Image: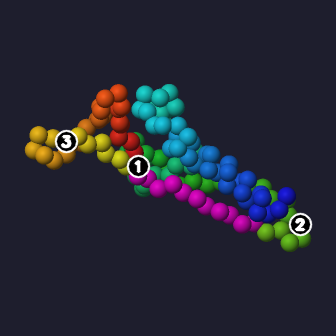
Amino acid sequence: MSHETDLRSARAVADAVMYEGYLLYPYRASAAKNQIRWQFGVLGPQGAAAAGVGEEPRLSTELLVRHGAGTAVTIHLRFLQLQSRDVQSADVAGGFASVDVLHVDNYHRLPWC
């Protein structure tokens, strides 16, 4: 296998891990997978874990390498960026107000972070 093939295979695995819960499954607060707060590789801002509202700001990993003549290690880091979405409904003043859930016909939209 070539280096490019290895890298494509590694990226496919990384994509599956990174995007699980974001693209592969729609987010529903009631889903069993969302009832337990555990995500691999999530980093939080300083102080978030101590305050009980987020994850630790550090992550470490170990790597075993079999070395030989010409051995080289290249590391690719990839990150998802935190985004938030607010669901809003029209209010009586002609503006918009945030709501916990927006019901339109049989469609229910929930905010998520």
Label 1 neighbourhood size at 10 Å, few (<14), some (14-19), many (20+)? some
Residue 51 appears in the rendering? yes
Residue type of the residue flagged with mark 3: Ala
In primary-sequence order, the first of circles 3 and 1 is 1
Residue occupying image coordinates x 65% and y 63% = 76
Report helix, strand or loop for mark 1.
loop
Q: Note whether 76 is above or below 23 in the view shown.
A: below
Which percent across, then down, holds residue 47?
Answer: 40, 52
Q: Which residues are magenta?
A: 73-83
- Asked if residue 55 lies left or right of residue 106, the reply is right
Report which residue position mark 1 lands on.
48
Q: CA distance from mark 3 to mark 1?
A: 33 Å
3 and 2 marks in contact (CB < 8 Å): no
Secondary structure mainly formed by the magenta segment: loop
Residue occupying image coordinates x 26% and y 42% = 88
In primary-sequence order, the first of circles 1 and 2 is 1
Would you say residue 95 sits in the magenta stretch?
A: no
Residue type of the residue flagged with mark 1: Ala
Residue occupying image coordinates x 83% and y 68% = 71
Give the quadrant of the N terminus: bottom right
Which percent across, then down, holds residue 68?
Answer: 89, 66
Q: Note whether 105 is above or below 54 in the view shown.
A: above
Mark 3, mark 2: which one is toward the viewer?
Answer: 3
Residue 68's disc is 2
Residue occupying image coordinates x 58% and y 48% = 18
Q: CA distance from mark 3 to mark 2?
A: 65 Å
| Of the pair 36 and 101, the residue shown nearer to us | 101
Report helix, strand or loop for mark 3.
strand
Report which residue position mark 3 lands on.
90
Which percent across, then down, holds residue 81?
Answer: 47, 56
